[in-house]
Image (cartoon, grey):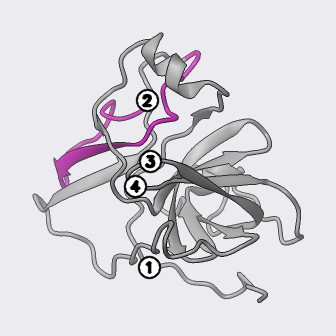
Amino acid sequence: MRISFAGVGVVGLVALVGCAADTSDTETSIEQTEPVIGGVVTRDRPEVGMASFSWGSYCTATLISPGVAITAAHCVDWETRDRTDRFGSLRLDKQPSGSARFQIDRYRALSPKGLGAPDVALLRLATPVPADVATPAPLATAKPANNTPLTIYGYGCNDDWEHQTGGGTKRDYHYRYGQRLENVLCP
């Protein structure tokens, strides 16, 4: 099945995208570095995964259909790649243990270059994610009211700006919508 990103509109709330340099031994680096800012280690919400890119960075990405994940446009440098290639993979941590990887073969940034509110990109997976690994998350259809309790899931990092390690483990963070999140999960 061919998925075209042309004309795709995204209505939703992108709550968190944590980016950092990819490390091959992330779990060890978490134990040997500065404490992670906020959050509690979790395997909940297997549809929230870590997209590792071929250029050596990673970001939180959320599965929104069996073959598509949503992330931040800055994770793909606000660019679009419409040709099939190997751009990295999406790792989904299954419950209670184990993980599965799915190749990212195309992506589309839905915002212009530069940080701002429309910092959204779609990642197309070469093969769909089976339901026994993760089911897609529904997109928000309305903005939450201030003070609504929410939980953010993502791969945060520590406050070591130079190395930004510690982001390879999923964490959750509870807060109320409208609360400032600066320096809570990732610099």
Disc 4 designates what residue? Answer: 95
Q: Which residue is mark 1?
A: 11
Main secondary structure along the magenta-highlighted residues: loop
Alpha-carbon distance for marks 3 and 2? Answer: 29 Å
State which quarter of the image contains the N terminus: bottom right
Query: Dot 2, how many residues are within 10 Å of its Cα: few (below 14), some (14-19), or many (20+)?
Result: some
Residue 108 placement: quadrant: bottom right
Name the foreground residue: 146 vs 159.
Answer: 159
Q: CA distance from mark 3 to mark 1?
A: 32 Å
Above or below, 133 against 56 in this view is below
Classify mark 4: helix, strand or loop.
loop
Reply above or below: 80 against 167. below
Q: Which residues are magenta?
A: 162-187
Q: Secondary structure at mark 2?
A: loop
Residue type for callout 4? Gln
Q: Residue furthest left?
A: 147
Q: Which residue is mark 2?
A: 187
